[in-house]
Image (cartoon, rainbow, N blue to C red):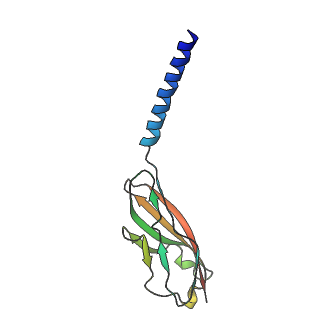
Amino acid sequence: MQTRMVRRALHLLMVLAAMLAGCALATKAPPVANAGPDMTVRVGERVSYDGSQSVDLDGGEIVYYQWKVTAAPEGREEEVGRVLREGEDAAVWTTESALANEDVGEWVIELKVTDDEGQSATDEMMLTAIP
């Protein structure tokens, strides 16, 4: 009798585990944004951004990228909130113009990615512009 109860309890535990695993697999996970490493760039050089390591963990795909300034050096605060580039083809890109003397300082650049289910995630990187 005790063996039968143990078997029944084990069976119920296996069924419960399978149900929970099914729920976890059915859950749509948000993407993971990866803005790349912090970088230091000299005045006169162009900046290359790379968010291609961003992934959608539930097997979907990233369909939209947006790069935005979230912090700027003193005197350049008007740049905060400015979208640098966005679109489905904005995972990897290089600025059209080189950094200028007025760009010197620390900038925080945010990458926001959106997957094919409309879920989003963000990551930030520090860009330090030096003379």
Q: Position of residue 31 (x, y in %)?
A: 46, 56
Q: Where is residue 125 in the image (x, y as percent from the top left)?
A: 56, 70
* Residue at the (55%, 67%) spot, across then down: 124
Q: Is residue 34 above or below residue 129?
A: above
Q: In which quarter of the image is the N terminus?
A: top right
Q: In which quarter of the image is residue 22?
A: top left
Q: Is residue 65 above or below residue 72?
A: above
**Count of marks overlaid on the render:** 0
Q: In which quarter of the image is residue 19?
A: top left
Query: In terms of depth relative to the viewer, which is nearer, 42 or 82?
Result: 42
Please identify the residue farthest to the top as the structure is shown. 1
Q: In which quarter of the image is the C terminus?
A: bottom right
* Residue at the (57%, 88%) spot, across then down: 102
Q: Quadrant of residue 27?
A: top left
Query: In terms of depth relative to the viewer, which is nearer, 68 or 16?
Result: 16
Query: In terms of depth relative to the viewer, which is nearer, 104 or 93?
Result: 93
Q: Position of residue 114 (x, y in %)?
A: 42, 60
Q: Where is residue 54 in the image (x, y as percent from the top left)?
A: 47, 62
Instruction: Classify residue 98 as left or right of residue 72.
Output: left
Q: In this view, does 23 lie above or below 73?
A: above
Please identify the residue farthest to the front as the structure is shown. 3
* Residue at the (50%, 81%) spot, across then down: 47
* Residue at the (45%, 67%) spot, across then down: 52
